[in-house]
Image: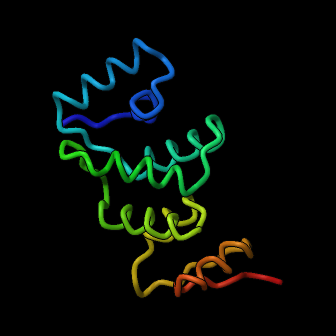
Amino acid sequence: MIAVDTNVVVRLLVGDDLKQSKAARALFEREIVWISRTVLLETAWVLDSVYGLEDRQVAATLGGLLGLAQVKVEDGEGVRLALAWAAQGMNLSDAIHLSGVPDSTRFTTFDRGLVRSAKKLGLNVVGLGS
């Protein structure tokens, strides 16, 4: 098994550098690839901020990646839950943060948008302040 950095995942997904994309594809074809939550979070940020994908597009793209048999992900259940929440309209980064919170733990934020989207999904998020 081999763990990969964000740049390897991005090259695989967007194919913007021919040589690096080819190397990334070859790696994913011959190895079991482990991807951390932080690499997924950073990949989501790159796909959004650099390539202009919306959260739902990013969630679909990452969902396809995680569907590959040779890909293993840190906290796979939590990440898949986060992708499902993003597919329902939650910001993907927020969803990744929330999916890692233990069940008996409340999550608090100043982000009113996060509170609203979490409540729509029935999640226990508490707004801090006014």
Measuring from the top left, give residue 130's x and y in whole percent.
Answer: 83, 84
84 is higher (above) or lower (below) than 21: below
- Does residue 27 lie above or below 84 as drawn? above
Figure label count: 0
Tell me where residue 14 appears, x and y as whole percent: 48, 30
The quarter of the picture where residue 27 lies is: top left
**Residue 32 at x, y percent in the picture:** 18, 38
Q: How is the image coloured?
A: rainbow
Residue furthest to the top in view is 19
76 with respect to 90 (left or right): left
**Quarter of the figure that contains the N terminus:** top left
Comparing 72 with 26, the one in front is 26
Going 40% across and 35% down the picture, which residue do you hit?
A: 9
| Left or right: 98, with 79 as reference point | right
* In the image: residue 36, left or right of residue 109: left
* Residue 71 pos. (x, y %): 24, 44
Please identify the residue farthest to the right as the structure is shown. Answer: 130
Q: Residue at x 54, y 86 (%)?
A: 124
Q: Residue at x 32, y 18 (%)?
A: 23
From this view, report whether residue 128 is shown above or below residue 62.
Answer: below
